[in-house]
Image: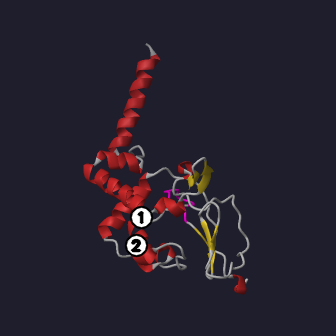
Amino acid sequence: MNPKPILTLAVAAVAVGAFALGARPAVSPAEAAAASPAASAQVARGEYLSKIMGCNDCHTPFHMTPRGPEPDMTRMLSGHPQNLVITEVPKPAGGPWIGSVAATNTAWAGPWGVSFTANLTPDPETGLGKWTVDTFIAAIRNGKHEGQGRPILPPMPWPMYRNATDEDLRALFAYLQSIPAIKNRVPQPLEPAETN
């Protein structure tokens, strides 16, 4: 007797049994959105919102191109690069200037200290992968990290974004959960120079 058909049948039986017991293969957020027209429309709405709200302007590191500085879309929405270490708050420029910004457009300094733009990708360790939609909405509404932590610092325009509808914030979160996860640990903000 040929053992190959028996082995094939055994593998098929295990696969059918696992499916019947609820063990289904993992599906990415993008695949899940593609499976449902409503979810797909929500993700598309979120992508549109991220573009008109300028999310890439600060949360995607800039790099120099022949046309000048532009967002590096290979690091889309991954926040301040972890390998660009900033340890000191720059001295105020004086005059009419209130702050300064890193060449990547991901670190901003001013009277609040230094703020670093967050990783908005769905990486579970360094981004929004463990956040829920309710946590995301609370963060935008309250201007606090994870809705209840430290203040969200300038230049993040959360006081304007907090006026978005729940539906739009849900769509934005659905989109952010559908993009590629990028592991990039953004540093914590630096306190103003006077308190260092």
Q: Is residue 119 magenta?
A: yes
Q: Is residue 88 visible?
A: yes
Instruction: Name the quadrant containing residue 79.
Output: bottom right
* Left or right of 137, for residue 112: right
Q: Quadrant of the C terminus?
A: bottom right
Secondary structure of residue under mark 2: helix
Q: State the image coordinates of residue 103 (x, y, percent, origin top left).
A: 64, 61
Which label is found at residue 53? 1
Residue at 71% in and 75% down:
90
**Residue 164, picture quadrant:** bottom left
Q: Residue furthest left?
A: 38
| Residue drawn at the location 49% of the way across and 50% of the way down | 180
Rendered location of residue 125, percent (x, y): 56, 60
On the image, the x and y values in percent for residue 74 come to 55, 48
Callout 1 amino acid? Met
Quadrant for residue 166, please give it.
bottom left
Percent coordinates x, y for residue 69 in the rendering: 59, 55
Tell whether label 1 touches label 2 (CB within 8 Å).
Answer: yes
Q: Secondary structure at mark 1?
A: loop
User: As shown in the figure, which amino acid type bears the numbered disc 2?
Assistant: Tyr
Residue closer to the observer: 67 or 171:
67
Judged from this view, the residue extending furthest toward the front is 95
Q: Could you tell me how far apart the alpha carbons at marks 2 and 1 are, in whole angstroms? A: 8 Å
- Residue at the (71%, 82%) spot, across then down: 193
Q: Main secondary structure of the magenta part?
A: loop
> Relative to 187, is 46 above or below?
above
Q: Which residues are magenta?
A: 118-126
Residue denoted by label 2: 161
